[in-house]
Amino acid sequence: MNERAIQSIRALEILDSRGFPTIRVRVTLKDGSVGVASVPSGASTGANEATELRDEDAKRYQGKGVLTAVKNVNTEIAALLVGRDATEQPAIDAAMIELDGTDNKSRLGANAILGVSQAVARAAAQSCEVPLYLWLGGVGAVHVPVPMMNVLNGGKHADSSLDFQEFMIMPKGAPTFAEALRYGSETFQALKKILHGKGYATSVGDEGGFAPQLKGGNDEACELIVTAIEKAGYRPGKDIAIALDPAASSFFESGKYRLVRSGQGEKTSDEMIALFGQWIGRYPIVSIEDGLAEDDWVGFAQMTAAMGAKIQIVGDDNLVTNPRFIARGIREKTCNAALIKLNQIGTVSETVDAIHLCRKAGWGFVISHRSGETEDTFMADFAVAMGGGQIKTGSICRSERIAKYNRLLEIEAELGGAARFGA
Ligand code: PGA
Ligand code: ZN
């Protein structure tokens, strides 16, 4: 009898950090090993993401229940996988994709499939008595990612005056992950004091960044961050840089970028690129994700040609962690890095494929959470398994964000002298 065969798979409807339903899956193996995984959920989603299956039953959770996805796991997927060897991750993922039978996992739900995929990986790691990062990444998994911490929230993540969704600090000059986290935390607290001193609110948005009504909009956000970095005793650009995710699809309407909240008016693609060009001269910005809308492939290519040698241009909504779109992005020189979200594509194996494509092309990659998260820390282990790179998992508050940072602290400590930090 194969001790690592899957004995049972059970799913449960739980709540995410916004209080909306999501799915948790528990996989048990014959030898008693257990893997549990919970799936996150986005708000500013790309049109081509794998389908997050919702019940659409208006009587429950405003239609956002996931009982159908739960049922799909407990019936069809369990029937498919019980008895299979949990260490055969690629074969298990491929079998679920085949069972689903659609291009975007819309029949069984990418949330159902990913929950199982991640829980299987966890159960296999436990059965082999190795930590998850080692199971997925092998003995070479010693690189701890550089965090991008989202300290000011706007766009679809907060009712602030910011059109741009994420203003992040990146402690790239820190010697270790633990020190990077300290740099970030101290800057976050300095920013809180500065905001308070100026009479701005210090309540936070979905990802734990402050969400004030800044009079000076997006520009003031960058200025305040630079001041906070200095106040905390760090050198802007050297110790701590700025990374942005405008999530431009969310304010792109009828062919124009509408910076309504900040009062900066309407902009064309060229004008947005010019604005970013000015900003990278003025602020220590090292990375811009979704500076343009997901269908603006031409604009993306122009932006990469204009500033890709100086900064990282990250594709999220346009690439959706899908090897097909990433391959097109590489061909058309659309970006020079990809955002990587497990639930955009829906299996662990396909996410690994997406990262391999990036690596082969010399692209950067950023492992990312979603704005609706859970206490699950799979992505922290996954980032180390994939060789580090960068990780985007929110601000320095809210436990669903901190859980990932705490797990990375644990991994770095466990690796001891073998741990490597930075690109
Ligand atoms: P989402 O936002 O999780 O709401 O999609 C994250 C991002 O745009 O990177
Ligand atoms: Zn994004």
Image (cartoon, grey):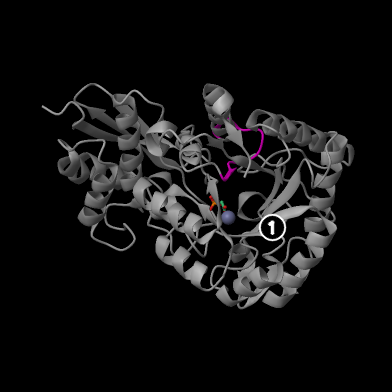
Question: Relative to the observer, which residue lies in front, 7 or 57?
Answer: 7
Question: Relative to the observer, which residue lies in front, 10 or 351?
Answer: 351
Q: In which quarter of the image is residue 195?
A: top right
Give the percent coordinates (x, y) of residue 400. Answer: 54, 33
Question: Relative to the observer, which residue lies in front, 53 or 387?
Answer: 387
Q: In which quarter of the image is residue 185?
A: top right
Task: For ligand 2, tell me if the residue under mark 1 lies within 8 Å.
Answer: no
Could you tell me which secondary element the residue under label 1 belongs to? loop
Q: Quadrant of residue 417?
A: top right
Give the percent coordinates (x, y) of residue 145. Answer: 58, 40
Position of residue 335 in the picture relative to residue 257 (left or right): left
Quick check: is 299 in the magenta stretch?
no
Q: Mark 1 points at which residue?
A: 164
Give the percent coordinates (x, y) of residue 76. Answer: 18, 46
Mark 1 nearby-residue class (10 Å; few <14, some 14–19, many ≥20): many
Check the image and report above or below for 303 versus 92. Answer: below
Give the percent coordinates (x, y) of residue 10. Answer: 26, 34
Question: Relative to the observer, which residue lies in front, 220 or 339?
Answer: 339
* Span highlighted in magenta in the image: 389-400
Residue kind at label 1, given as amino acid type: Phe
Q: Is residue 180 visible?
A: yes
Location of the C terminus by quadrant is top right
Q: Can residue 412 be seen in this view?
A: no
- Residue at point 52% right, 22% down? 414
- Residue at point 25% right, 42% down? 73
Judged from the image, the quadrant occupied by ligand 2 is bottom right
Quick one: which residue is furthest to the left in this view? 1
Check the image and report above or below for 33 versus 114. Answer: above
Check the image and report above or below for 302 versus 197. Answer: below
Quick check: is 399 in the magenta stretch?
yes
